[in-house]
Amino acid sequence: TQLLEQSPQFLSIQEGENLTVYCNSSSVFSSLQWYRQEPGEGPVLLVTVVTGGEVKKLKRLTFQFGDARKDSSLHITAAQTGDTGLYLCAGDLLRDGGGADGLTFGKGTHLIIQP
Amino acid sequence: DVKVTQSSRYLVKRTGEKVFLECVQDMDHENMFWYRQDPGLGLRLIYFSYDVKMKEKGDIPEGYSVSREKKERFSLILESASTNQTSMYLCASTPLRQGHQPQHFGDGTRLSIL
């Protein structure tokens, strides 16, 4: 069972276009994180959202956490070739006893921005 | 900046061998994690540790064990490597035993079992 469904799995668009990546679950998360991974490297954190309904902006990237803390989206405005990469959402499920017991990751979105 | 270092970027081993993957972090983080990353499956948690000599099973611990003798070092052990353990292995660390902490990843070890 995939706790975090990420869509689309692959996306190829032209430079300058806008796009949205979705991360959905039937589970409630205490927080949700978005990472970006480039070939040959480990994932790097972009943002953490904690509060239901929260919106965070990172230059041309806008992240939103759903009101019920079950879903999140990443919107990129005017995509650039440097945005190319694998985008991963990851949720922090509070397991028994709480604590940082590892994240639950979505399968990722492979994003290609063509010049 | 936090530095998580995995000892090998690429590793090729044979079926049945005992394989050690090493991970070291330099920021005194309490929590350390081992994931494997496979196409179409994403990252899956194998084992994690929140203190020296402590270990907890993740979602797919079968065929693996771990060792944490020192706070900065977390080793993943494939007791008897099999071809289905060919994968990218990622180590990560976080400070303290609380939620909302970002995971700091190493650059991964691409392991091939022949």
Image (tube, rainbow, N blue to C red):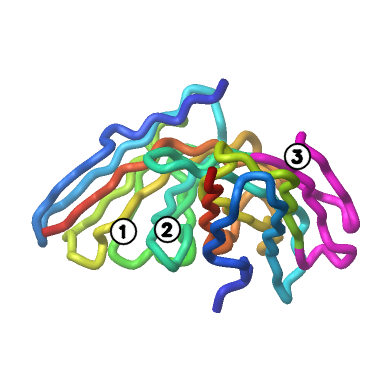
| Residue drawn at x 16%, y 57% as measured from the top left | B113
Is residue A102 magenta-colored? no
- A71 or A110: nearer the viewer: A110
Please, what is the three-letter code of the amino acid marked with disc 3? Arg
Is residue A51 rendered magenta in the image? yes
Badge count: 3
**Badge 2 is on which residue?**
B46
Report the chain holding disc 2. B
Cβ–Cβ below 8 Å for labels 1 and 2? Answer: yes
- The subunit carrying tag 3 is A
User: Which residue is label 1 attached to?
Assistant: B64
Check disc 3 and report the residue beneath it. A60
Give the class, few, some or many, for how many residues have Cα within 10 Å of label 1's Cα (few <14, many ≥20). some
Residue A89 visible in the displayed image: yes
Q: Is residue A78 above or below residue B114?
A: above
Nearer to me, B34 or A71:
A71
> Which SS class for mark 3?
loop
**Element type where label 1 sits in the image:** strand
User: Residue B89 at what x, y percent from top left?
Assistant: 36, 49
